[in-house]
């Protein structure tokens, strides 16, 4: 996974670089939004970390221009600004997540992982499991019995688990990925949605959702 870091504070950029490299990421660092756009013109990045207050081109301008160009790379803004209006401006410009300095680097890594997982789900758009097809654009599941439009969270939960069939997910992992890192809902919400999915697809011959007692859930392919 490649990360573009746009941060004019050299020491902070080096800290982010070191931490992310330790977690298996490949890094390119730049010092302002203009340099970030130039880097994106020649390379693909999986995710972007961007400061707001930078010389030449600030974070708001950078992300706004990025989205205007049709680039959907997930962006996390990291900034000293903590007023609600600043946060609102960041999201309106097209950022996907927001952290306020001083940064807990471990939390930053977790948030980046959640952003990347959500981005993967959005970009792939379609999943086939046996004779069952999940269509992201319409939140529709199609199988031998017909088609069904699912509520958004149920669809995303099922899509996530079937995308990694056989992998065990804790309730907290599913909460972070589907409801978002800052959701105020508790993990019981996951149990409720899993129950609804099981009821709807208990006779589906292509997959099954299994409870891993004391841990979480996994989906398995049956054919």
Image (cartoon, helix red, strand yellow):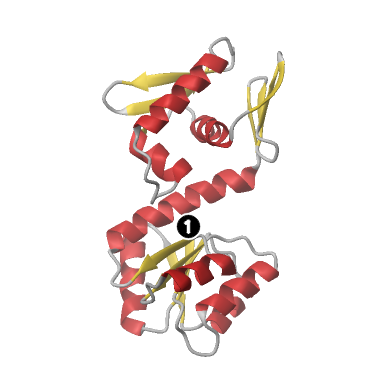
Residue 97 location (% of width, % of height): 46, 60
Q: Percent position (x, y) of residue 74?
A: 54, 60
Secondary structure at numbered mark 1: loop
- Check disc 1 and report the residue beneath it: 1
Q: Quadrant of the C terminus?
A: top right
| Nearest the eye: 17 or 143 | 143
16 relative to 94 in the view: left or right:
left
x and y percent of residue 38 in the render? 61, 79
**141 left or right, relative to 2:** right
The 10 Å Cα crowd at callout 1, few under 14, some 14 to 19, many 20 or more, is: few
- Position of residue 181 relative to residue 39, above or below, is above
Q: Residue at x 59, y 13 (%)?
A: 204
* Residue at image point 50% right, 83% down: 32
Q: Would residue 44 be seen by someone viewing this image from the given angle?
A: yes
Can residue 39 be seen here?
no
Residue name at image x 42 percent, y 52 percent:
113
Estimate the x, y position of residue 90 in percent, counting from the top left.
51, 69
Residue at 42% across, 79% down: 7
């Amino acid at each position: 996974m490649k990360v573009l870091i746009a941060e004019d504070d050299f020491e902070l950029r080096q800290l982010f670089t070191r931490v992310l490299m330790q977690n298996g990421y490949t890094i390119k660092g730049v010092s302002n939004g203009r340099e970030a756009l130039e880097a994106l013109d020649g390379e693909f990045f999986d995710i972007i970390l961007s400061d707001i207050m930078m010389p030449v081109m600030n974070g708001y301008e950078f992300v706004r221009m990025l989205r205007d160009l049709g680039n959907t790379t997930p962006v996390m803004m990291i900034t000293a600004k903590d007023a609600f209006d600043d946060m609102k401006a960041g999201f309106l410009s097209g950022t996907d997540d927001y952290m306020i300095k001083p940064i807990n680097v471990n939390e930053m890594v977790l948030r980046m992982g959640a952003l990347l997982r959500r981005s993967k789900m959005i970009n792939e758009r379609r999943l086939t499991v046996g004779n069952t097809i999940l269509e992201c654009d319409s939140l529709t599941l199609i199988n031998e019995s017909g088609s069904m439009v699912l509520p958004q969270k149920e669809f995303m939960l099922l899509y996530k688990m079937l995308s990694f069939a056989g992998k065990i997910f804790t309730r907290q992992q599913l909460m972070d990925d589907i409801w978002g890192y800052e959701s105020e809902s508790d993990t019981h919400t996951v149990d409720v949605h899993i129950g609804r999915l099981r009821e709807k697809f208990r006779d589906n011959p292509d997959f099954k959702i299994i409870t891993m007692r004391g841990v979480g859930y996994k989906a398995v392919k049956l054919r």
